[in-house]
Amino acid sequence: MEQSYVCPLLNETIDEGECYDVQMVLNGFIKPQILKQPLNIEKANLICYSCQFNHLPIDFTK
């Protein structure tokens, strides 16, 4: 069973799968169209890197 939590980027409750999808988009492995809503890449890079729920903590801001 997947966990759910409030995403600091999207400001809504999401499950682990949705969080992972965001990370996969940020890492360039899947297209942004897979997400339910448009993603602000610059904002996501800043927020997601330090997020406690991030499964792929890669810093793309450097």
Image (cartoon, rainbow, N blue to C red):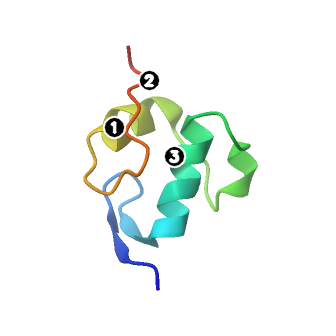
- Any mark on residue 60, and which? 2
Could you say whether the residue bearing mark 1 is in a helix, strand or loop? helix
Quarter of image, res 24: top right
Q: Is residue 33 left or right of 46 when viewed as pictured? A: right
Q: Secondary structure at mark 3?
A: helix
Count residues near mark 3 (Cα–Cα under 10 Å), then give few for <14, some for 14-19, many for 20+.
Answer: many
Residue type beneath disc 3: Gln
Q: What residue is pinned by disc 3?
A: 23
Identify which residue, 20 or 40, lies in the foreground: 20
What residue occupies the far bottom of the structure in this picture?
1
Q: Amino acid at mark 1?
A: Tyr
Q: Which residue is mark 1?
A: 49
Residue at screen point 52% across, 34% down: 41
Q: Amino acid at mark 2?
A: Phe
| Residue 15 tag number | none
> Which quadrant is home to the C terminus?
top left
What residue do we see at 31% from left, 55% from top? 8
